[in-house]
Image: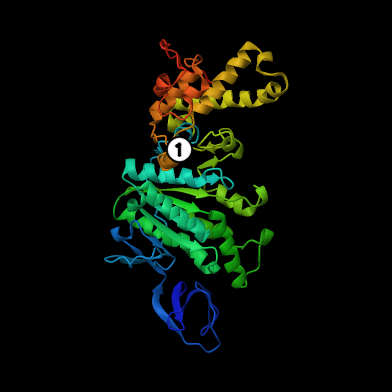
Amino acid sequence: MPPINALLHAKEKAISIEVLAQLDAHCVRGIALTPTQGLARGTVVEDTGGPLKVPVGKAILSRMFDVFGNAIDRQPAPTGVEWRSVHRAPPSLAQRSTKTEIFETGIKVIDVLVPLERGGKAGLFGGAGVGKTVLLTEMIHNMVGHQNGISIFCGIGERCREGEELYHDMQKAGVLPNMVMVFGQMDEPPGSRFRVGHAALTMAEYFRDDEHRDVLLLIDNIFRFIQAGMEVSGLMGQMPSRLGYQPTLGTELSQLEERIANTTAGAITSIQAVYVPADDLTDPAAVHTFSHLSASIVLSRKRASEGLYPSVDLLQSSSKMATPGIIGERHYLLAQEIRKTLAQYEDLKGTIAMLGLEQLAPDDRKVVARARRLERFLTQPFFATEQFSGIKGKLVSLKDSLDGCERILRDEFKDYPESALYMIGAIDEAKSKPGAPKSAAKPALAPVAAP
């Protein structure tokens, strides 16, 4: 009898089946990973003698694969690779790193307000056209170019159009040589979509454990993994649970998420696009996903329409790393002060719309001026968009980002036009922008008071 997770072939390897249950001494129940046209009662099924495997090694870089490890980029199959099972246990507690570190992205708004955890998981929430792919592309660029890392993009239930566009975008941005792409397309059977995440993780674990390199794993979309699991569960004849989800939802998601970890050898840091069904945050899929995330980055269509890119919603986005013990007292207080200023501005927007800015109290006008300058300073030109915008991309260190925000909150830039702070890197670039005062004395920095 073939064991659980064994890969079976039928019709001369045209149909692949994975064993999910042994019903009795003579029968197994499997799930098809390929379309089953032509499969009939009495067809001979062969046991491959092992589980589903994917290639790992340096030769897989810059390539695009399906769930079986077949190259789908119209190039010859990679040579000199090792084939590993997609079913691997998460790292043990003894192997995990106990140190909590911040993963610097070089993107001001994320590093200051939504710090990511090295070896952690961040959720990226947003609709179509608000800049999810551009933000992911920029993170890949910064990871590859400045941290000597590897990026792996895993498309679960992706449209083939999106996959092709992303491949060419990465090629143009020059980040493909240190990147691997794995796709389980939308038209493939649920078994294939259900396993493609495990296939991508096996490749990520090779670069972490064997090459000792940091890996950035991008998953789009984690909800489609849960959806594929729901279809598999129905095909296996399991009784559905709440709202029609599979009874094993929590276990299946944990088996995938727990493999994304920070070990003594290296770290897999994951950014996952999350679709929230019908905007219902109490949906079981969203609830189980949230429990694994250490940061939530929410993209706003309103900010995108105002040209404030990256269009991160500064008040809705949050991170569990933003505590004084992890990011330090100064960074924590500064982030709280920024949020407080932006929240006050949000409250005043109604009054400004009805009565105008001139009718506000002097103190409120100062708050509005600071908030608007902060919003513009937290925009950033991306390397990924250089060819479209004509503005050279900028990578900004955390120190420069914090200094810039602190100096804006101290009103050092109150005489500068708001446009001087738009789409710049470090704050001192504002002094060379049109409209900037010729000589501005730099006031001494006072410590930020707790909000």
Secondary structure under the numbered disc 1 in the rendered image: helix
Q: Is residue 26 above or below residue 73?
A: below
Residue farthest right in this picture: 354
Q: Residue at x 40, y 23 (%)?
A: 429
Q: Nearer the viewer, residue 309 or 399?
A: 309
Q: Is residue 230 visible?
A: yes
Q: Is residue 202 above or below residue 321?
A: below
Mark 1 Cα shell of 10 Å, populated few (<14), some (14-19), many (≥20):
few
Residue 249 sits in quarter: bottom right
Screen quadrant of the C terminus: top right
Q: Is residue 96 visible?
A: no
Screen quadrant of the N terminus: bottom left
Please give left or right for residue 440 compared with residue 364 in the image.
left
Q: Nearer the viewer, residue 339 or 395?
A: 395
Q: How many marks?
A: 1
Display coloring: rainbow
Please give left or right for residue 104 compared with residue 300 in the image.
left
Residue farthest bottom in this picture: 42
Q: Position of residue 81 (x, y in %)?
A: 29, 65
Residue farthest left in this picture: 80
Q: Position of residue 435 (x, y in %)?
A: 47, 17
Q: Residue at x 42, y 70 (%)?
A: 52
Q: Amino acid at mark 1?
A: Ser
Q: Residue at x 54, y 69 (%)?
A: 189
Q: Is residue 372 above or below residue 120?
A: above
Please give left or right for residue 136 compared with residue 239 in the image.
left
Q: Residue at x 54, y 20 (%)?
A: 370
Q: Position of residue 94 (x, y in %)?
A: 36, 51
Q: Is residue 282 above or below residue 11?
A: above
Q: Position of residue 317 (x, y in %)?
A: 55, 37
Residue that mark 1 sits on:
389
